[in-house]
Amino acid sequence: MDERIKRLVKTSKTIKDMLNAVALEVQENCAHEECYECEYEESKFHGRAKPPCRICLECRLIEEGWGCGYKLLENSNILKTIDRYELYRMRIPGKAGQHRKN
């Protein structure tokens, strides 16, 4: 492989790892004061229903509302309801942007 490509691949991985570490640290220390919410979606064509979700506007933590309900975003002020695709566009790439399941 070309040396420039190797360096860029290595740099890209380092940046992704750094983004994940910083995002997780920010999410752990965030007050989660304001969030957006997307509603439950019924199953279509025998597929799986999608749970309601919230996303913190400051740290981009995403949490599902099924199971035991919201834990981290339970007391957040919900500013508006958005569609699921808008929520997906707001995610942080990588592990820090995955849903927290309860």
Image (spheres, rainbow, N blue to C red):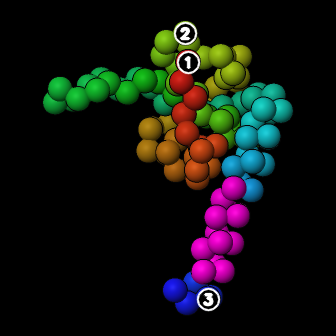
The outermost residue toward the left is 45
- Label 3 secondary element: helix
Residue 92 versus residue 2 in the image, above or below? above
Distance CA(mark 2)–CA(mark 3): 50 Å
Name the secondary structure under disc 2: loop
The span from disc 1 to disc 3 (Cα, nearest Å) is 44 Å
**Tag 2 and tag 3, C-beta contact below 8 Å:** no
For label 1, the crowd category at 10 Å Cα-Cα, with few meaning under 14, some 14 to 19 and many 20 or more, is few
Residue type of the residue flagged with mark 3: Glu
Residue 73, disc: none
Residue plotted at (58% across, 29% down)? 100
Q: Nearer the viewer, residue 91 or 38?
A: 91
- Residue 50 percent location from the top left of the image: 37, 27
Left or right side of 6 for 87: left
Check disc 2 and give the amino acid type.
Cys
Instruction: Tell me where the magenta segment starts and ends, as one range.
Output: 6-17
- Disc sitting over residue 68 in the figure: 2
Alpha carbons under labels 2 and 1: distance apart:
6 Å
Instruction: Find disc 1 in the rendering and name its residue.
Output: 102
72 on left or right of 49: right
Mark before the other along the chain sequence, 2 or 1 = 2
Q: Amino acid at mark 1?
A: Asn
Query: Which mark lies nearer to you, 1 or 3?
Result: 3
Q: Considering only order in the chain, which callout, 3 or 1, is on the residue closer to the N terminus? A: 3
Q: Are marks 2 and 1 in contact (CB under 8 Å)?
A: yes
According to the image, label 3 marks what residue? Answer: 3
Mark nearer the N terminus (2 vs 3): 3
